[in-house]
Amino acid sequence: MRRLNITFLLLGLIFIAKAQNVKPKAPEFALGSFTDDYGITYTINDTLWVQNPTTKYHIIKWNPEKQYLVAKNDAGNKTDGNKYTRIDYMTFSGMEPWRWGFCLTAYDAATDVIAEQTAYVDRQNPKKGCNGYPFSRMKKVETKP
């Protein structure tokens, strides 16, 4: 009986450890290829945000509840390489084809913690809620087979 209890305890600890290592994934609407309302194109997946042609953000953390992500800037980025970025996002209704938008809340933070703690977007006012500027609106780009 004691051996059985120890086995269940170990299985429980393994399950908890694995559950803690599971990183939230990107919301479905943010995955794929997009164009913003400035004509810039993007490719986004769970681990990489690419602002074409060459700016890359390596995603460390998605927080779907609070609608932001934290990323490390690629070393090869023209500016702010190896710094940290916080990107806040929100969905839109009644703005088709613009279904969602984003704000570079922080883009040159020294650490991921500093980037994550930089939170001053106003989602109630998407036209000025990104540090006085509008959220960049995103529309899906249909890829051809």
Image: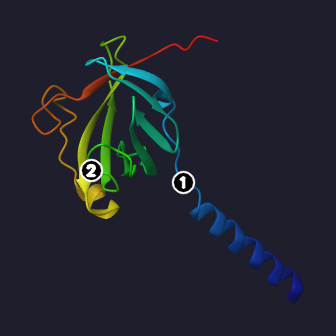
Question: Which quadrant holds residue 105?
Answer: top left
Q: What residue is shown at x 49% (from left), y 40% (from top)?
A: 26
| The one of 62 and 143 positioned closer to us in this rendering | 143
Q: Give the residue pinned by disc 1.
A: 23
- Residue 24 at x, y percent in the picture: 52, 49
Give the residue type that dot 1 points to: Lys
In the rendered image, the residue lying farthest to the left is 132
Which quadrant of the figure has residue 96? top left
Question: Which residue sits at x=42%, y=35%?
Answer: 50
Q: Estimate the x, y position of residue 4 in percent, counting from the top left.
A: 87, 81
In the foreground, 58 or 3 = 58
Q: Residue at x 59, y 10 (%)?
A: 144
Q: Is residue 36 above or below residue 31?
A: above
Q: Name the secondary structure under disc 1.
A: loop
How far apart are the two marked residues, 2 and 1, measured between alpha carbons? 25 Å
Rate crowding at label 1 as few (under 14), some (14 to 19) or many (20 or more) other CA atoms within 10 Å.
few
Question: Residue most toward the bottom?
Answer: 2
The type of colouring in the image is rainbow
Disc 2 is placed on an element classified as loop
Q: Position of residue 97 (x, y in %)?
A: 37, 11
Asked whether disc 2 touches disc 1, contact meaning CB atoms under 8 Å apart, the reply is no
* Labelled disc at residue 69: none
Q: Which residue is mark 2?
A: 80
* Amino acid at the residue labelled 2: Asp
**Residue 65: % across, % down:** 40, 45
Quarter of the image that includes the C terminus: top right
Q: Residues within 10 Å of mark 2 (few under 14, many from 20)?
A: some
